[in-house]
Amino acid sequence: MTDTSRIWTAALIVVGDEILSGRTHDKNIAQVATWLGVQGIRLREVRVVPDDMAAIIEAVNALRARNDYLFTTGGIGPTHDDITVDAVAEALGVPVVIHPEAEAMLTRYYETRGGINPARLRMARVPEGADLIPNRLSGAPGIQVGNVFLMAGVPGITAQMLDGLTGTLEGGAPLLSATVGCWVAESEIADLLRETEKTHEGCQIGSYPFFREGRVGANFVIRSTDQTVLDAVAQVLIDGLAALGREAVPGGI
Amino acid sequence: MTDTSRIWTAALIVVGDEILSGRTHDKNIAQVATWLGVQGIRLREVRVVPDDMAAIIEAVNALRARNDYLFTTGGIGPTHDDITVDAVAEALGVPVVIHPEAEAMLTRYYETRGGINPARLRMARVPEGADLIPNRLSGAPGIQVGNVFLMAGVPGITAQMLDGLTGTLEGGAPLLSATVGCWVAESEIADLLRETEKTHEGCQIGSYPFFREGRVGANFVIRSTDQTVLDAVAQVLIDGLAALGREAVPGGI
């Protein structure tokens, strides 16, 4: 049963020199954030850290303590730069062990792919006491230990692992959102946004400006766990924009 | 003059509920990371935090102390949810003041755009003692205060501000990289990667696997500040792959 009053939070640690070098554009932040929202869990903070034991350990201990869930992406592969399992184990103060079920999965998977080898066996290493998160795309599973979930860095594999977790985590009421767009400079209607948010309990309004086709516009995103609040606030914005001679675009631009 | 032995580091704070909700895919991490690399500065850590004073203040104080430079993106616009200036000022223990030059710039910019108003004037607010970072795209400047650089959330505007800063920050030797790709499972050549990195001073090798056209492959990214080391290590990998009957793709796949 879901407690809809309590707010459940998660943090994400993206492990990867390739993100910090700018070489790779991260796709996991948005993917994990969107998935969490559907589970009724709010992503509160993300940290991108290098492939460095001390940096990962610090982030793991800071974030797992103050969130209901902690996710990591990256660093659970077979190569020398994959150290997330070791870092999480050290952060939790437990040894790294071979998970027999993971070893069996990997042995099966690689039977027709050149066979298991020491590097591939690395992907069966888990912090002691961990459970596996299934992954249909490759032989290597994700790992859950306590409230920490270790996922792959390759977004397609992370998607499989998230799919395997769907509906299994306790969460609250999903945060709903409604968007109202307008071809207006946000600075022209800042008062309307502030007043509308202030006068409506339990809603937040974000203002996201853009430049497109040589014109300025903005999307105003209303967030609430209550659909009736969302609808009411959206209407207030639409009417308020009309009163200022501006046509709103329900659903956003 | 540039000290090429010292490693200069930076951190980035991405401020924005829209990133944490998954609604917006961040583009600033890769943009800032790439720009920093060219300046000879390494991005050591990124944090994505909500539009929340306490969260921004904590991240600012943690990261500005242990890095040469701290960049922030987002939250410096004209609306009620733009609180980065206030949070940085509080983190630094200084008041927020109107910067006369910023006020003049904004007044000029909005002369032909409906005129200045209180919301637009918000964009002239800076932590006391701050300098401005020019921005040709919109009237609102970026802000530098101490080793903290406040940039826009809109990537196109951030690009303008980075352009304005190019060559002005002290840095070390840029980290160079060379990529060798191969249609091989990284788990087949993990030993080659580990040995090659171990036997070559001052180089790191990252292994980035992918699934494409139904085949597994990986790009191996060698990083060093020394081009001769890069070239040597790339050749060692190419030869090592050949010895395993695998054809390398110099430059990556």
Image (cartoon, coloured by chain):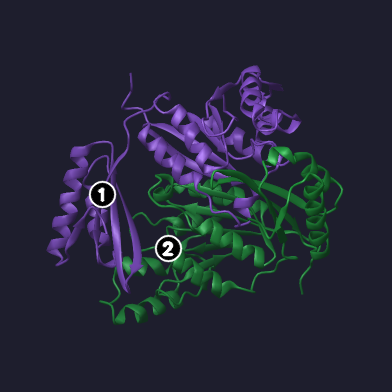
Chain colours: A green, B purple
Q: Nearer the viewer, residue B90 or A126?
A: B90
Q: Position of residue A65 (x, y in %)?
A: 65, 52
In the visual, does A156 lie left or right of B92?
left
In the rendered image, the vertical position of residue A77 relative to residue B41, given as above or below: below
* Dot 1 alpha-carbon crowd within 10 angstroms: few under 14, some 14 to 19, many 20 or more: some
Instruction: Single out the mark in the foreground, 2 or 1.
Output: 2
Helix, strand or loop at disc 2? loop
Q: Which mark is residue B81?
A: none
Q: Position of residue A115 (x, y in %)?
A: 27, 77
Helix, strand or loop at disc 1? helix
**Residue occupying image coordinates x 50% and y 44%:** B28
**Residue occupying image coordinates x 75% and y 40%:** A190
**Label 2 lies in what chain?**
A
Displayed quadrant of residue B15: top right
Say which quadrant the C terminus of chain A sits in.
Answer: bottom right
In the rendered image, the vertical position of residue B130 relative to residue A230, given as above or below: above
Residue identified by numbered label 2: A154
**Residue occupying image coordinates x 57% and y 33%:** B138
Q: Position of residue B88 (x, y in %)?
A: 64, 31
Q: Inspect the image, locate mark 2, and give the three-letter code of the amino acid beneath it.
A: Val
Q: Nearer the viewer, residue B85 or B53?
A: B85
Residue identified by numbered label 1: B197
**Residue occupying image coordinates x 13% and y 56%:** B239
Q: Nearer the viewer, residue B118 or A113?
A: B118
